[in-house]
Image (cartoon, rainbow, N blue to C red):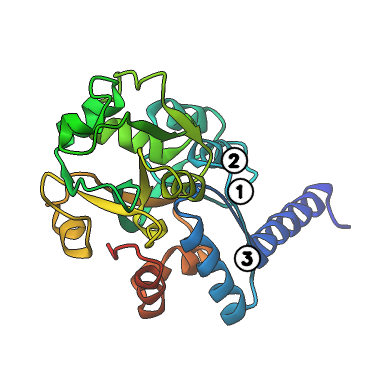
């Protein structure tokens, strides 16, 4: 006679196998709008090559972290490192967040194409966003009030900007306008003669003008060697060390095809 313990063990094994199989056949990503183009291009490539369903949502880095913590995504895409309080919340929920660097990014400072200003120091940018410098003539531009464009508080790009430029604890001017995505920031700056904003490199095009920071432009070499002062890594976060199809997906940035995709999107290979 088959024991109840044996039947229970069989059911447990079947449940574990089913979960593993489900994980292999569906990968869910959620998080950063900056990492979004990479995530979506990887997803399309991966599904075509391996037949694995990959879905991508762009709710912001903070929400990506929350999705990983509550188990609603396989991979959190983040344009900043996970915060201590997020890691603590993950551990309390039985999640072990492991970071994987996908690519490097330079935060491009952008202005209206007709703005004559070509370079700003990091201190000048900080002063502008803290409301200490309010007119372009104070930094070599026209006699025109500066319109500040920033990202929402849940944005990893906003967090990175504050960390790298103004300082984490520094209050950005209350006059700053908030936009919900890189694309929205670019659109506002491209149509506003006195605006300034910041974008991930992959979102820069001719509709805006990139300003050098400390005399350095955010090109591939400067971002990679660290001479561009507003650079950061972009992340995939998983629960523990991944295996199977998730491991293959996480390893894409190290492959020739993955590197090609990252370069074509305007980001920098790690």
Relative horizontal placement of residue 62, taking residue 210 as reference (left or right) = right
Q: Residues within 10 Å of mark 2 (few under 14, many from 20)?
A: many
Mark 2 → mark 3, Cα distance in angstroms: 18 Å
The residue mark sitting in front, 3 or 1, is 1
* Of callouts 3 and 1, the N-terminal one: 3
Mark 3 → mark 1, Cα distance in angstroms: 13 Å
Relative horizontal placement of residue 240, taking residue 122 as reference (left or right) = right
- The quadrant of the rendering that contains the C terminus is bottom left
Q: Write the residue at 23% across / 44% down.
A: 230
Instruction: Give the percent coordinates (x, y) of residue 3.
Output: 83, 51
Q: How many labels does the image show?
A: 3
Q: Write the residue at 49% across / 61% down.
A: 37
Instruction: Give the percent coordinates (x, y) of residue 122.
Output: 17, 36
Instruction: Give the percent coordinates (x, y) of residue 89.
Output: 50, 27
Kind of element beneath mark 2? helix
- The quadrant of the rendering that contains the N terminus is bottom right
As drawn, which residue projects farthest toward the front?
A: 143
As drawn, which residue projects farthest toward the right?
A: 1
The answer to the question of whether label 1 and label 2 lie on touching residues, with beta carbons closer than 8 A, is yes
* Of callouts 2 and 3, the N-terminal one: 3
> What's the mark number on residue 73?
1
Residue 213 visible in rendering: yes
The answer to the question of whether label 3 and label 1 lie on touching residues, with beta carbons closer than 8 A, is no
Q: Nearer the viewer, residue 232 or 194?
A: 194
Q: Write the residue at 46% across / 37% down.
A: 155
Kind of element beneath mark 3? helix
**163 versus 250 height, above or below:** above
Residue denoted by label 3: 24
Residue denoted by label 2: 67
Residue 239 visible in rendering: no
Mark 1 → mark 2, Cα distance in angstroms: 5 Å
């Amino acid at each position: 006679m088959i024991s109840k313990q044996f039947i229970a063990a069989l059911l447990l094994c079947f449940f574990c196998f089913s979960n593993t199989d489900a994980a292999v056949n569906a990968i869910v990503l959620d998080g950063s709008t900056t990492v979004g183009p990479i995530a979506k291009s990887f997803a399309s490539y991966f599904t075509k090559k391996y037949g694995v369903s990959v879905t991508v949502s762009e709710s912001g880095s903070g929400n990506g972290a929350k999705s990983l913590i509550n188990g609603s995504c396989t991979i959190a895409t983040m344009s900043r490192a996970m915060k201590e309080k997020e890691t603590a919340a993950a551990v309390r929920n039985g999640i072990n967040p492991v970071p994987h660097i996908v690519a490097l990014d330079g935060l491009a400072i952008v202005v209206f194409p007709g703005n004559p200003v070509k370079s700003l120091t990091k201190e000048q940018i900080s002063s502008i966003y803290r409301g200490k410098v309010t007119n372009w003539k104070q930094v070599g531009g026209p006699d025109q009030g500066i319109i500040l464009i920033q990202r929402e508080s849940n944005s990893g790009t906003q967090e990175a900007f504050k960390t790298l430029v103004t300082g984490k604890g520094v209050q950005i001017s209350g006059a700053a306008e908030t936009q919900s995505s890189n694309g929205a920031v670019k659109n506002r700056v491209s149509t506003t003669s006195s605006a300034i904003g910041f974008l991930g490199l992959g979102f820069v095009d001719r509709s805006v003008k990139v300003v050098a920071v400390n005399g350095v432009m955010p090109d591939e070499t400067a971002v990679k060697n660290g001479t561009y002062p507003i650079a950061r890594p972009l992340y995939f976060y998983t629960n523990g060390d991944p295996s199977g199809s998730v491991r293959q997906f996480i390893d894409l940035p190290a492959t020739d095809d993955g590197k090609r995709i990252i370069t074509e999107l305007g980001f920098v290979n790690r």
